[in-house]
Image (cartoon, rainbow, N blue to C red):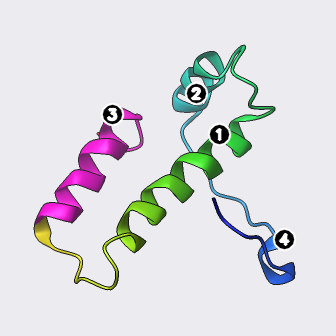
Amino acid sequence: MFKVSEKDKKFTTVSIPTPLFKKVQERIKDTGFTSVSSYVTYVLREIVAEGEEEEGEPFTKEDEERVKDRLRALGYLG
C-alpha cells in the first residue's frame, strides 16, 4: 500500500454529484470504510498504483480507456 509522508497528510476538497455521493454511501455500508472520502481515496490510490506498477511505461490510449471504464463503472463519468 502507500506510504504517507508529512506533505501527503494535507487534504483538498473534490466535488462529486450528490446522487453519486449517495450511491457510494450505500455501497460502503458495512464495509469498514468510515466515510465516502476514505473510500474514494482508496479507489483513486488503487488506480494510480496500477499505473505505477507498469514501471515507467508510457500511459497508452488503452490505459486511458481502462481508467475511464473503471471511473464510469464507479459513476464518476457519464
- Which element type, helix, strand or loop, lies under badge 3? helix
Is the residue under label 4 in contact with that under label 3 (CB below 8 Å)? no
Q: Residue at x 54, y 38 (%)?
A: 17
Residue 71 is situated, as x and y percent measured from the top left of the image, at: 36, 45
- The residue to which callout 4 is attached is 9
Viewer-side label of 4, 2? 4
Instruction: Judge the density around disc 3: few (<14), some (14-19), many (≥20) Cα neighbours within 10 Å.
Output: few
Are discs 1 and 4 less than 8 Å apart at CB? no
Labels 2 & 1 near each other (Cβ < 8 A): yes
Q: Quadrant of residue 52?
A: bottom left
Q: Are marks 2 and 3 in contact (CB under 8 Å)?
A: no
Asked whether residue 46 appears in the rendered view, the answer is yes
Q: Tell me which numbered mark, 2 or 3, is placed earlier along the sequence.
A: 2
The amino acid on which the numbered mark 4 sits, given as a three-letter code, is Lys
The magenta span reads 62-77
Quadrant of residue 27 in the image?
A: top right
Q: Amino acid at mark 1?
A: Tyr
Marks 3 and 1, the one that precedes in the sequence:
1
- Of labels 4 and 2, earlier in sequence is 4
Do the CB atoms of the residues marked 3 and 1 lie less than 8 Å apart? no
34 relative position to 62: left or right: right
Distance from Cα at disc 3 to Cα at disc 1: 15 Å
- Residue bearing mark 3: 73
The rendered magenta stretch, by its main secondary structure, is classed as: helix
Instruction: Say which quadrant the C terminus sits in.
Output: top left
Residue 13: x %, y % from top left = 72, 60
